[in-house]
Image (cartoon, rainbow, N blue to C red):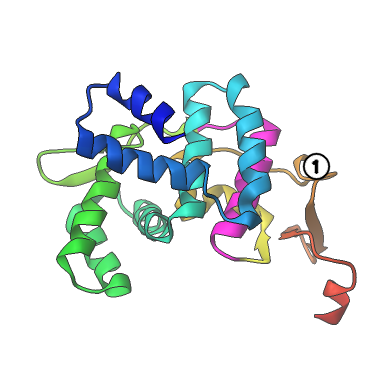
Amino acid sequence: MYQVLDEALQENGRGAKARRNARTILIKLWFRVDSRCASLRQRALRLSPSLSPGERLVLHWGMALLAYPFFRDIVHEMGRLFAFQDAVAGHQIARKVKTLYGDRRRVGVAATAVLGSMKAWGVVEAGADHLYRQSMPIVVERPELKRWLTEVLLHAFDEQWMVLELIPSAPALFPFRFSLKSHELEKTTLQLVRQGGNMTMVGIEQKKGAIAQK
């Protein structure tokens, strides 16, 4: 696996150190995944050949949310800020992650790397003023991709239940635009529970008796 990746990365003119770093990240994203997320990885691999480049980014983004809590925390904060303002300053993100991971140089360097990755993927644009602005959102229309993203979100944030109507606007999914209807999640491993009014809760399937015990 390392050899195949190294050969592929050489085609992009990357140096030895850059290739080594990229290999490590890609292996953690797609190969050495947590056993609880193995089925999500397999479904992503099955979906990938039929997707457009933009849709494939959805898969890569989701796997990054699952593999790297640091990435998850940064994109969640960025999405939260984008909900209230048109541009986000790099120092705003750095300040937030340092409150979570400590005020160390390594934390700042890692945060800059994540922001650089988002820029390279085309989900944000960075100006000379060190402000990051959202690029044109990627529209997600395939029901199977919406279902996959929903499960990723539940696993990445270790949530048993989420409000269905709020999932499309989850801060960590800020680069994507999609609607989500309950019928798109039926006949899956997800559970749907309707509560009062028009609110529907979406949860990860539990073993029999687990809900009753709670």
**Residue visible at 25% across and 55% down?**
110
The residue furthest left is 128
Q: Secondary structure at mark 1?
A: helix
Q: Give the overall secondary structure of the magenta segment.
A: helix
**Residue visible at 62% across and 52% down?**
37
The residue furthest front is 3
**Residue visible at 36% across and 36% down?**
123
Spot occupied by residue 168 in the image (x, y as percentages of width and height): 57, 47
Spot occupied by residue 89 in the image (x, y as percentages of width and height): 20, 53
Which residue matches tag 1? 183
Spot occupied by residue 124 in the image (x, y as percentages of width and height): 31, 38
**Residue 148 painted magenta:** yes
Callout 1 amino acid: His
Q: Is residue 74 left or right of residue 105?
A: right
Q: Is residue 43 left or right of residue 210?
A: left
55 above or below 188? above
Spot occupied by residue 36 in the image (x, y as percentages of width and height): 65, 57
Dividing the picture into quarters, in which one does residue 9 lie?
Answer: top left
**Residue visible at 73% across and 59% down?**
204
Q: Where does the magenta region start and end?
A: 139-158
